Image: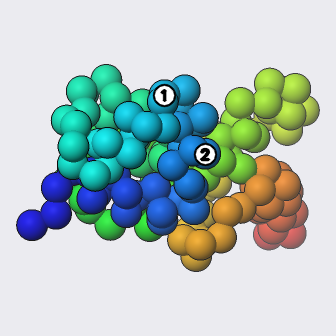
Amino acid sequence: MPNIGQHIRKARKLAGLSQEELADRIKVNRSYLSLVENGKSSPTFEFLEKLAGGLKISVEALVLGEETSDSTSPSASGTPAYEGLADLLEDGEQLLLMNPTEEEVKILLSIRVDPHYRPSKKLFVEALLDYRKTRLMK
């Protein structure tokens, strides 16, 4: 039966990150991440929260080892799993210009892509513009 470290390694690899990249992203020591992944150290809940946030999955999915390749739904913290969408939603100037409705944000959150594809902010901007064009044509 896989342990928590194996679940973490699987989620990290599915996210396309090296240990060093993930450690840098969540501001922890890479050696400690390695120890946890190899089952030589038990992670704290706070560490698991950081990991889940950095991997853009829920803590539950991380701990249970649920299939994390479908990380398109918002995580437990309510942030989108795709970095490109998170970038768009965190860009105050872009949001001010585009002024997406709650419905449009839900539509953007529902976009699904191949787990190995990392959609950019531009993809979500274009998707929103295409959605608006389609609505105007009706």
Q: Is residue 109 visible?
A: no
Q: CA distance from mark 1 to mark 2?
A: 10 Å
Q: Is residue 88 left or right of residue 17?
A: right
Q: Position of residue 8 (x, y in %)?
A: 34, 52
Q: Residue at x 60, y 52 (%)?
A: 82
Name the amino acid, label 1: Val
Does 62 sit above or below residue 112?
Answer: above
- Mark closer to the chain start, 1 or 2: 2
Query: Which quadrant is the C terminus positioned in?
Result: bottom right
Front-lying residue, 128 or 17? 17
Res. 101 image quadrant: top right
Query: Which quadrant is the N terminus positioned in?
Result: bottom left
Classify 10 Å Cα crowding around label 1: few (below 14), some (14-19), many (20 and above): some
Does 114 sit above or below residue 48?
Answer: below
Classify 10 Å Cα crowding around label 2: few (below 14), some (14-19), many (20 and above): some
Residue on which disc 2 sits: 21
Q: Residue at x 54, y 71 (%)?
A: 115
Res. 102 image quadrant: top right
Q: Position of residue 78 (x, y in %)?
A: 46, 35
Q: Residue at x 48, y 28 (%)?
A: 28
Q: Is residue 70 left or right of residue 129?
A: left
Q: Secondary structure at mark 2?
A: helix
